[in-house]
C-alpha cells in the first residue's frame, strides 16, 4: 500500500518505480502520515484475523527515513495502537534510528539481498551486501522479526556461480539468531520494454538486462525468464538454500 513516500533516490535498473517517473525515480514525500496511519490502525481492527500491512512497496522507507525521520514514529505508533504487523523491504543499512525504539516486534523487516556482483552492476546507489547483512543482524538482535528477500534473481553470465558464492557469504556472515529466526522469499526478475528504453538512454554503459534468448514476453511490453529456465533456476536455488540454511522456511519462489 502507498505510505509516506513514493519513488527512490537509488537507481536499480529493474525497479518498477523508474517506469512510473520516466528516467528519474525521484523521492516524493507525503506529509499526511497521521491520516494514513489512522487508516491502517482502523483497518487492523476490522478484520477477524491479524493482518500484515506492506508499507514499503512504493519506496524504500529506510532510505526515506534519512530525509524525513518518519520511520521510528511509524513503527512505535503502530506498536502502541495497531493490531497485527507492518512489513517493509529495504536495500539499505541506515537502520540505527530504529534499533532502540519500542517496536514490540510488530514490524517485520525484509532485507533485500543479491550477490555483490549484481549490486555493483545493477543496484546503483544501494548499500553493499556486507552492510546489509550487518544491518539485518542488528535488527534481529533488537528483536525485530526479519526475513531475507533474495530478489530479484538475475541470470547474468555465470549466475549460478555468483549465487552459490553469495549464499556462502550469507551463511558465513549472518548471525546464528538470524539463521534461526529468518524466513526467505525468492523472486525472479521481470523486466520491460520501457525499462530497456529508459536504461539504454540513461545508463548507456550499464549491463543489458534484457536477453532475448532467456526471456519471453508476458504481455504489455513485459518480459520474464522462460518458464523452463525459471523452473530450473528455482530448483537450483531451493537446493542451494537448503544446503546452507536447512532449517529456514522458503516462503515462496516466483
Ligand atoms: S532501492 Fe528499491 S525502490 Fe529504490 S530504486 Fe532500488 S528497487 Fe527501486
Image (cartoon, rainbow, N blue to C red):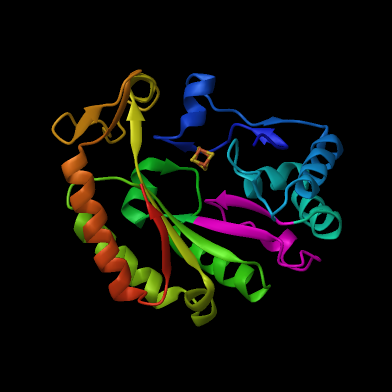
Please state if 185 lies on the left or on the right of 79 as rendered.
Answer: left
Q: Which residue is located at x 32 percent, y 64 percent?
A: 166
Residue extending farthest to the front is 48
What residue do we see at 50% from left, 53% from top? 127
* Above/below status of 232 relative to 146: above
Q: Which residues are magenta?
A: 84-111
Q: Position of residue 101 (x, y in %)?
A: 79, 65
- Residue 1 in the image: x percent, y percent? 64, 37
Which residue is farthest bottom? 176
Q: Residue furthest left?
A: 213
Camera-side residue: 92 or 230?
230
Front residue of 105 and 161: 105
Within the magenta stretch, is there residue 102? yes
Name the quadrant containing residue 21. Answer: top right
Residue occupying image coordinates x 73% and y 61%: 98
> In the image, is 105 to the left or to the right of 172?
right
The image position of residue 57, as x and y in percent, is 58, 39
Seen in the image, is 158 located left or right of residue 202? left
Residue 112 in magenta stretch: no
- Number of marks in the image? 0
Instruction: Residue 205 in the image: state x and y as whole percent.
Output: 30, 30
Give the residue displayed 55% in from the left and 27% down from the top.
25
Amino acid at each position: 500500500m502507498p505510505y509516506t513516500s513514493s519513488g527512490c533516490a537509488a537507481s536499480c535498473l529493474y525497479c518498477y518505480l523508474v517506469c512510473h517517473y520516466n528516467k528519474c525515480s525521484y523521492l516524493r514525500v507525503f506529509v499526511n502520515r497521521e491520516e494514513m496511519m489512522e487508516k491502517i490502525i482502523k483497518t487492523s481492527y476490522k478484520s477477524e484475523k491479524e493482518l500484515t500491512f506492506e508499507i514499503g512497496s512504493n519506496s524504500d522507507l529506510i532510505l526515506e527515513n534519512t530525509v524525513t525521520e518518519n520511520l521510528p514514529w511509524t513503527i512505535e505508533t503502530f506498536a502502541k495502537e495497531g493490531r497485527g504487523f507492518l512489513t517493509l523491504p529495504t536495500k539499505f543499512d541506515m537502520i540505527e534510528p530504529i534499533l532502540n525504539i519500542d517496536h514490540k516486534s510488530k514490524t517485520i523487516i525484509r532485507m533485500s539481498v543479491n550477490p555483490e556482483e549484481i549490486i555493483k552492476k545493477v543496484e546503483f546507489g544501494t548499500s553493499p551486501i556486507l552492510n546489509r547483512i550487518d544491518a539485518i543482524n542488528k535488527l534481529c538482535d533488537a528483536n525485530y522479526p526479519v526475513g531475507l528477500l533474495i530478489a530479484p534473481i538475475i541470470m547474468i553470465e555465470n549466475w549460478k556461480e555468483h549465487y552459490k558464492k553469495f549464499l556462502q557469504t550469507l551463511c558465513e556472515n549472518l548471525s546464528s539468531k538470524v539463521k534461526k529466526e529468518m524466513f526467505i522469499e525468492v523472486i525472479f526478475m521481470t523486466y520491460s520494454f520501457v525499462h530497456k528504453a529508459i536504461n539504454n538512454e540513461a545508463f548507456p554503459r550499464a549491463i543489458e538486462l534484457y536477453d532475448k534468448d532467456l526471456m519471453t514476453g508476458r504481455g504489455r511490453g513485459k518480459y520474464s525468464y522462460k518458464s523452463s529456465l525459471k523452473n530450473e533456476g528455482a530448483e537450483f536455488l531451493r537446493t542451494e538454500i537448503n544446503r546452507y540454511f536447512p532449517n529456514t522456511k522458503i516462503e515462496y519462489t516466483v
